[in-house]
Image (cartoon, rainbow, N blue to C red):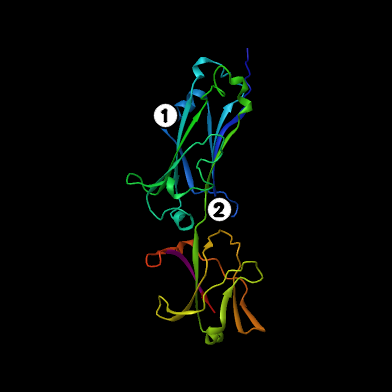
Amino acid sequence: MQINHILQFQELLSITINHGYYYNNRCNDFIFEVENETMQTIKEYGIVVKQEPNKLILIIDAIKDFNHFCYLGEMELNFKITNKNPQFLNFTELPFISNQCIAFEQIKERELLHAAENVTIDICHESYSTNGINGNINLRLNKDNELFGLSSSDKNKFLPIRHSINFKERNVYWKYLIYGSSKYMEDIESLYIYEKNQNNSITFTKAIPVKLPNGKDGYLFISEKTLPLKERPNKQFGLYLNKSKNTENQLIKSLPCPNPRSVNFDSYTEKFYVQEFINI
């Protein structure tokens, strides 16, 4: 006699990591880890764990009968996220500390695992026992036996349970270092960097003479306001030659976004800067 068992899967829970720096908002910089006790619980319930680049998904057998006293009571699930991108702090609004742990909490009737709209400094703690950026996630399900146990027949009203974590892009001052042998370098007092035809346009300081790392002369332009670091910038700045109010020569239509690798903190000004070299 052949017995056929049909599996029908149903999403129980998911945790998604988002980041404002990325164009699609998807943050693939973390690895999810399931704590040992949680893994044992998952096996007892026959839960399937699936990992996507920015998401952890728990799946259950929708046909399985959980209407039994052995499934009564609160279920505690603990996860850890570990960052794998060494440049993460450069473009993320977090304390500039190499080793830190972030404490995520489950908030009633709220999808986010933190009180503010983004991960904030107050839930980040310097860690001496771990390397890099880590996070601890503690979830408690089935407090009222709404998913498993005697009243589990109503679980479809509560599923799927979706949680998310939102990181914010770092806002920094942008620097452009202009150098080269172009004839326009002789008119440095008439060179400007700004955002053209935009409301609340962002402007840069006038040229500041500097010595470049190779010993050559260059000129520094610094944004007058902080700007967000984005994988695909939503601001477009150009280099212009303006000798009078009635003349404008566009030398570079779109300057590149500074690489987040160049982010540094100036202890004197207590500000973050990012820079890009432009040869004209």
In the figure, is residue 122 to the left or right of 252? left
Q: Quadrant of the C terminus?
A: bottom right
Query: Which portion, as a residue range, is magenta?
Result: 271-277
| Relative height, residue 203 to residue 24 (above, below) | below
Q: Amino acid at mark 1?
A: Glu
Report the front residue among 29 and 69.
69
| Relative height, residue 26 to residue 249 (above, below) | above
* Position of residue 166 measured from the top left corner of the image (x, y, whole percent): 53, 47
In the figure, is residue 65 to the left or right of 136? right
Q: Residue at x 48, y 68 (%)?
A: 275
* Position of residue 74 measured from the top left corner of the image (x, y, whole percent): 48, 24
Distance from disc 1 to disc 2, alpha carbons, whole Å, reads: 33 Å
Q: Residue at x 52, y 55 (%)?
A: 169
| Relative height, residue 185 to residue 226 (above, below) | below
**Labels 1 and 2 touching (C-beta < 8 A):** no
Q: Secondary structure at mark 1?
A: helix
* Position of residue 19 measured from the top left corner of the image (x, y, whole percent): 54, 50
Residue 52 visible in the picture:
no
Q: Residue under label 2, please give it.
A: 20
Q: Secondary structure at mark 2?
A: loop
Checking the image for residue 194, the label placed there is none
Looking at this rendering, what residue extends furthest in the left direction? 128
| Relative height, residue 135 to residue 179 (above, below) | above
Disc 1 crowd, CA 10 A, few/some/many (<14, 14-19, 20+)? few
Q: Residue under label 1, please give it.
A: 37
Report the front residue among 205 and 14.
205
Q: Amino acid at mark 2?
A: Gly
Q: Residue at x 53, y 28 (%)?
A: 47
